[in-house]
């Protein structure tokens, strides 16, 4: 079983926002904030941002609980700051 995932594949998985039945896809993510703090979110869904996500290399992450209720605020995450995706170490 693989222990790593390429960043481009993790971003492709991020871009799939719903199942064919219309349910949001939940994932876990670990990333580094601009101040150096390591953040782990065990359950999150994709969300939008007010910034230009492609130009600024950002993705929106919203923490959720097991019933998909929001449990925090949206995080703007730089794709360069991704450390882990669904338990797999992110590599270039």
Image: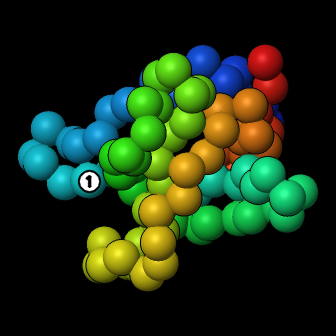
Of the pair 3 and 80, the residue shown nearer to us: 80
In this picture the colour scheme is: rainbow
In the rendered image, residue 61, in percent from the top left (x then y), is placed at: 49, 54
Indicate the position of residue 13 as horizontal and vertical percent values.
Answer: 45, 31
Count of numbered circles in the view: 1
Q: Nearer the viewer, residue 5 or 70?
A: 70
Residue 52 horizontal/vertical position (percent)? 43, 31
Along the viewing direction, whichever of 77 and 28 lies nearer the viewer: 77
Residue in the image at 57% along x and 28% along y: 56
Tell me if mark 1 has few (under 14), some (14-19) or many (20+) residues whose alpha carbon lies within 10 angstroms of its own: some
63 in relation to 36, above or below: below
Residue 26 occupies which quadrant of the picture? bottom left
- The answer to which quarter of the image holds residue 14 is top left
User: Is residue 10 among the parts visible in the rendering?
Assistant: no
Residue 18 pos. (x, y %): 23, 43
For residue 1, side relative to residue 41 (left or right): right
Q: Name the residue under label 1.
A: 24
Left or right: residue 2 compared with residue 15: right
Instruction: From this view, report whether residue 42 is shown above or below residue 6.
Output: below
Front residue (pair 1, 4): 4
Instruction: Quarter of the image for the N terminus: give it.
Output: top right
Which residue is at 65% across, 38% downward?
A: 78
Looking at the rendered image, the quarter that the C terminus falls into is top right
Residue at the far front: name it. Answer: 51
For the point 51% across and 20% down, which residue is it? 55
Q: In which quadrant of the rendered view does residue 58 lie?
A: top right
Rendered residue at 60%/18% (across/down):
8
**Most distant residue in the right direction:** 36
Callout 1 secondary element:
loop
- Position of residue 7 in the picture relative to residue 28 (left or right): right
Tell me if I can see residue 69 in this picture: yes
């Amino acid at each position: 079983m693989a222990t790593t995932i390429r960043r481009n594949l993790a971003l492709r998985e991020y871009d799939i926002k719903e199942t064919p039945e219309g349910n949001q896809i939940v994932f876990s993510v670990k990333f580094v904030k601009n101040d150096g703090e390591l953040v782990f979110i065990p359950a999150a869904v994709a969300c939008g941002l007010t910034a230009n996500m492609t130009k600024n290399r950002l993705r929106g992450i919203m923490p959720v609980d097991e019933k998909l209720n929001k449990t925090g605020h949206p995080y703007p995450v730089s794709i360069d700051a991704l450390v882990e995706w669904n338990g797999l170490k992110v590599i270039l």
